[in-house]
Image (cartoon, rainbow, N blue to C red):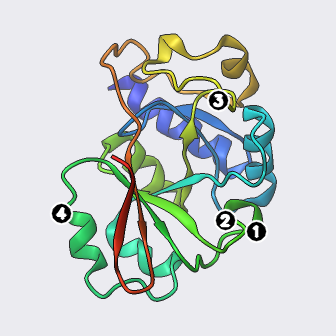
Amino acid sequence: MVDFENDIRNCIDTLERGGTILYPTDTVWGIGCDALNENAIDKVFSIKKRPREKSLIVLLAEAKDILHYVAAPPPDIIDMLDNFAQPTTVIYEHALEFPANAIHEDGSIAIRVTRDPFCKAILKRLRKPLVSTSANFSGAPTPSTFSRIDGQLKKAVDYVVHYRQNDESIASPSRLIHLDDEGNMKIIRG
């Protein structure tokens, strides 16, 4: 647990200074930053060599936090999110509070409420949403474990988390769904 607490402190310090982190999530390893910091988001795009028109995923600690960042979500959204059996990223129309480079050009935002204790600890102490994009260069395969992350990418971020680096469990990206204004769901990636 020593790595866990030290890593949380180092992540918060890095994020508050506008830096980027490489960290384990409830799915795959991710590159992250303060999702409300426009300059930090620019750094993530640059590190990944990702086209700006490809939006990023954002993590929140609690389902109720959706109410701060999405205009007019369905009334049952909290129950819906709490009942997902697997990590699920939801694309919402009408994002609120995020800088322009965090949202898609159509005004939507992709958000996942994490159940991972490490991610929750970061989010609760930071008190802001966290960018979470897979730890690969744009177009390259998503690495399933820390050991498969490109060494150049590891060097490009400001802080690399030690916690769970030796975990060789194969992880998959989250399920991805789109939720429209009427509350209809469409599965994009199952």
| Residue placed under numbered mark 4 in the picture | 83
Q: Earlier in the sequence, mark 1 or mark 3?
A: 1
- Mark in the foreground, 4 or 3: 4
Q: Earlier in the sequence, mark 4 or mark 2?
A: 4
Disc 1 to disc 3, C-alpha distance: 25 Å
- Across and down, in percent, residue 75 comes to 30, 88
* Residue 100 - label: 1
**As shown in the figure, which amino acid type bears the numbered disc 4?**
Asn
Which residue is pictured at 43% across the width and 18% down the height?
Answer: 145
* Residue 159 - label: 3
**As shown in the figure, which amino acid type bears the numbered disc 3?**
Tyr
Disc 1 to disc 2, C-alpha distance: 6 Å
Q: Are marks 4 and 3 in contact (CB under 8 Å)?
A: no
Q: Secondary structure at mark 2?
A: loop
**As shown in the figure, which amino acid type bears the numbered disc 2?**
Ile
**As shown in the figure, which amino acid type bears the numbered disc 1?**
Ala
Disc 4 to disc 1, C-alpha distance: 30 Å
- Across and down, in percent, residue 169 comes to 30, 18
Q: Secondary structure at mark 3?
A: strand
Q: Are marks 1 and 3 in contact (CB under 8 Å)?
A: no
- Mark in the foreground, 1 or 3: 1
Q: Secondary structure at mark 4?
A: loop
Which residue is pictured at 35% across the width and 85% down the height?
Answer: 74
